Image: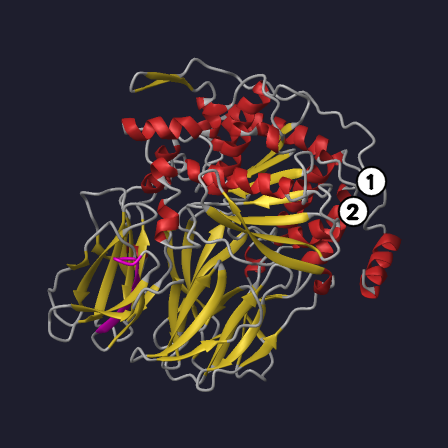
């Protein structure tokens, strides 16, 4: 230990934040679980009869559901309140959370705009300053939009002349947003208000903006009904939403997502259509030609396309067409017929994306799940590899073509996000904003290890722990995974990980198949009929941690959210003996009915659907809800969800928890924590994040017999 750590630790002990010898000695009494009514609902899937006794829980407006939720929360609150060190964990976690969170500055007009949170604000504040040395001024504070911080900003965009700013407001964590507009000269709010928008912000063009919206739902349908017939509209500033012009719709395909992009010179309008979460089609219309129609630019839906930059009859797209590790292509419209050519070929590393600033293009790569960045001229000539501060994750490098500087954010497991200023001409980086933290990062280390999965495939994993750890198998370990939807897990700061490491624990994050860390082939190896590979990878990660002495089955917790909640649910039902604690958050637990709610239909390209006989067969084999076996001793489980989750509706977690409570074959607790006025996770207030993480860590430490120092 360093002297600094001893000093901090002594001060905390004096303040009563941590306790010594808090190893569980008392027995916590778990109240009887609420009796959940079981009905006789049975579905027939191609001759297989599947009971669904808790179908009634899918009605989130029913009084019976509300009563069950309230009763379950009472049992969970009572259990957690008995953990003797819970308050102390909460105090230390609050200290670790209390550091400045910085956003990447972006210049619009004469001002630099950026989000910042001075520590514990529920929502980050949008500031601006006229020049980097000028004083900061609050431009928009979302904390003033609600008393409890449950209203959040989900998207901000500026008009092409920087005169106006559109921002999307989400309430209580819902995916539904309301688009509002501000005058950047006066800071005044305009009367323009756009409602019933999902998965869309404002794309400015001319006197207004494009957005993607739905027809107004009924109150009963708002948080659970299937989203159908998304349309693209154009809103002219100063007019009512009822006057908005519909730009594009697809009456033949009600379950397609639609979004719009426009070139910087307003010449081309692009529509991106997707039938799920991967693979899209791109259409284009020449806005300079009256009466022009949309033409297919890239047919769907075998590949992914995203626009990086468009101007002067040229557009650069990021795609995995004939390139599983992705590449950039350019479309030239000058001849009247689009001509596609390769701009940046596929390389050995995964091309994660690209951005433009100051007349340069910045290519973002993942090298063994760690960020790397290259700079190119707009003629395609490579200028340099950019030297990054350390092993970690980078974002930013965007701005107008006239700017000489740009900014980027860099973070790692033990170092929160810092902002760097980058000189585009020279390639020099300089620290711009670096947060002070309530711990010594030098006490901890990050290592990347590789292990073999069940079929021999090498899988990578990051481990964070104290430098002085002894591999004796006595450490609590928190194994986190996702493994799906082409999403990459890369190094990033978490107060949970630091507190765990302070207590002698190990934070482990596995790069499972199904994710995007190693390209589209890695993604496809963990989807549809190959989804079991993801679970095998996660199980192998747990076995590696135990075999190498980082932890033991009595000390190991597994965690994941959304698709990661499915991961935890599947792994705890397949190998209940391997873990002490399971922490599934907002998980997709009912694989037979997920596609019947809100946007769940879009996941069928990833999972398959129970409407298809072959796909039903492999989904049913791992669906967490349907693979709980009565009388089995399952890990101590804390399911977490929220009442406003309209991404993965809470009925998934309700049904899973009720089934698990009825089936548990030993005295390990099976609890569910249902947050109110919260959703899938985005925009959750800081206070609620701290409270939930406190409960999760307290539950984990208690049920792994961890001595909290």
- Would you say residue 316 sits in the magenta stretch? yes
- Count of numbered labels shown in the rendering: 2
Q: What is the residue that sits farthest to the front in this orientation?
A: 456
- Would you say residue 540 sits in the magenta stretch? no
Up the image or down, 664 lies above or below 332; here it is above
Up the image or down, 9 lies above or below 664; here it is below
Badge number at residue 22: 1
Image marks 1 and 2: residues in contact by CB distance under 8 Å: yes
Up the image or down, 289 lies above or below 468; here it is below
Toward the viewer: 138 or 333? Answer: 333
Residue 172 percent coordinates (x, y): 52, 47
Quarter of image, res 127: bottom right
- Which residue is tagged 2? 88
Residue 301 relative to residue 620: left or right: left
Toward the viewer: 70 or 315? Answer: 315
Q: Residue at x 42, y 35 (%)?
A: 532
| Residue mark closest to the camera, 1 vs 2 | 1
Quarter of image, res 366: bottom left
Quarter of image, res 272: bottom left
Q: Secondary structure at mark 1?
A: loop
Residue 456 percent coordinates (x, y): 46, 42
Q: Residue at x 40, y 16 (%)?
A: 41
- Per the rendered image, the range of residues in magenta is 314-323
Query: Does residue 562 appear in the picture of this structure?
Result: no
Whichever of labels 1 and 2 marks the residue nearer the N terminus, that label is 1
Q: Secondary structure at mark 2?
A: helix
Q: Residue at x 59, y 62 (%)?
A: 412
């Amino acid at each position: 230990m360093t002297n600094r750590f001893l000093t901090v630790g002594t001060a905390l002990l004096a303040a009563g934040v941590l306790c010594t010898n808090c190893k569980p000695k008392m027995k916590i009494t778990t109240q009887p679980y609420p009796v959940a009514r079981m009905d006789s609902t049975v579905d027939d899937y191609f001759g297989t009869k599947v009971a669904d006794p808790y179908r009634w829980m899918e009605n989130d407006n029913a009084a019976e559901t509300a009563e069950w939720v309230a009763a379950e929360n009472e049992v969970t609150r009572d259990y957690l309140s008995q953990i003797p060190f819970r308050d102390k964990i909460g105090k230390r976690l609050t200290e670790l959370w209390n550091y400045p969170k910085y956003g990447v500055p972006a210049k619009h007009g004469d001002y630099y705009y950026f989000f910042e949170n001075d520590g514990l604000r529920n929502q980050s504040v949008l500031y601006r300053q006229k020049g980097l040395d000028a004083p900061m001024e609050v431009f928009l504070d979302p904390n003033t939009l609600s008393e409890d911080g449950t209203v959040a900003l989900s998207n901000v965009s500026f008009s092409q002349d920087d005169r106006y700013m559109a921002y999307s407001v989400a309430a209580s964590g819902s995916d539904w947003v309301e688009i509002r507009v501000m005058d950047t000269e006066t800071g005044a709010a305009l009367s323009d208000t756009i409602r019933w928008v999902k998965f869309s912000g404002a794309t400015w063009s001319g006197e207004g903006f494009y957005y993607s919206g739905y027809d107004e739902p009924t109150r009963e349908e708002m948080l659970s009904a299937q989203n159908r017939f998304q349309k693209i509209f154009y809103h002219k500033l100063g007019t009512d939403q009822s006057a908005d012009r519909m730009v594009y719709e697809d009456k033949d395909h009600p379950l397609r997502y639609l979004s719009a992009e426009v070139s910087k010179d307003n010449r081309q309008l692009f529509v991106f259509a997707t039938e799920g979460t991967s693979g899209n089609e791109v259409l284009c219309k020449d806005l300079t030609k009256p009466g022009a129609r949309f033409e297919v630019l890239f047919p769907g839906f075998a590949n992914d396309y995203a626009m990086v930059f468009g101007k002067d009859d040229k557009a650069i797209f990021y795609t995995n067409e004939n390139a599983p590790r992705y590449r950039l292509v350019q479309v030239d419209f000058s001849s009247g017929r689009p001509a596609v050519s390769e701009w940046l070929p596929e390389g050995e590393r995964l091309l994660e994306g690209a951005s433009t600033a100051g007349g340069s293009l910045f290519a973002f790569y993942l090298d063994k799940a760690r960020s790397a960045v290259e700079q190119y001229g707009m003629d395609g000539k490579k200028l340099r590899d950019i030297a990054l501060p350390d092993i970690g994750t980078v974002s930013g490098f965007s701005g107008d073509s006239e700017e000489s500087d740009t900014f980027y954010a860099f973070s790692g497991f033990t170092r929160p996000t810092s902002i760097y200023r980058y000189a585009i001409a020279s390639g020099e980086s300089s620290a711009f904003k670096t947060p002070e933290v309530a711990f010594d990062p030098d006490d901890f280390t990050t290592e990347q290890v590789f292990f073999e999965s069940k079929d021999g495939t090498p899988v990578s994993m990051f481990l964070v722990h104290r430098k002085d750890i002894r591999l004796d198998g006595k450490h609590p370990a928190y194994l986190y995974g996702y493994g799906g939807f082409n999403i990459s897990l890369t190094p990033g700061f978490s107060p949970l990980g630091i507190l765990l490491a302070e207590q002698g624990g190990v934070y482990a994050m596995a790069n499972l198949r199904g994710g995007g860390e190693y390209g589209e082939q890695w993604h496809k190896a963990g989807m549809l009929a190959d989804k079991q590979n993801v679970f095998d990878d996660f199980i192998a990660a747990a076995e590696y941690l135990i075999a190498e002495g980082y932890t033991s089955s009595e000390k190991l917790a597994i965690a994941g959210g959304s698709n990661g909640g499915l991961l935890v649910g599947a792994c705890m039902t397949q190998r209940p003996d391997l873990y002490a604690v399971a922490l599934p958050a907002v998980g997709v637990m009912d694989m037979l009915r997920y596609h019947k709610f809100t946007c769940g239909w879009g996941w069928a390209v990833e999972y398959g659907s129970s409407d298809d006989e072959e796909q039903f067969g492999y989904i049913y084999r791992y669906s967490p809800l349907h693979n709980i076996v009565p009388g089995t001793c399952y890990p101590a489980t804390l399911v977490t969800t929220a009442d406003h989750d309209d991404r993965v509706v809470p009925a998934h977690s309700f049904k899973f928890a009720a089934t698990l409570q009825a089936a548990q074959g030993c005295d390990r607790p099976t609890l569910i924590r249902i947050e109110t006025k919260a959703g899938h996770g985005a925009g959750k207030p800081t206070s609620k994040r701290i409270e939930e993480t406190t409960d999760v860590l307290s539950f984990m430490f208690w049920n792994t017999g961890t001595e909290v120092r």
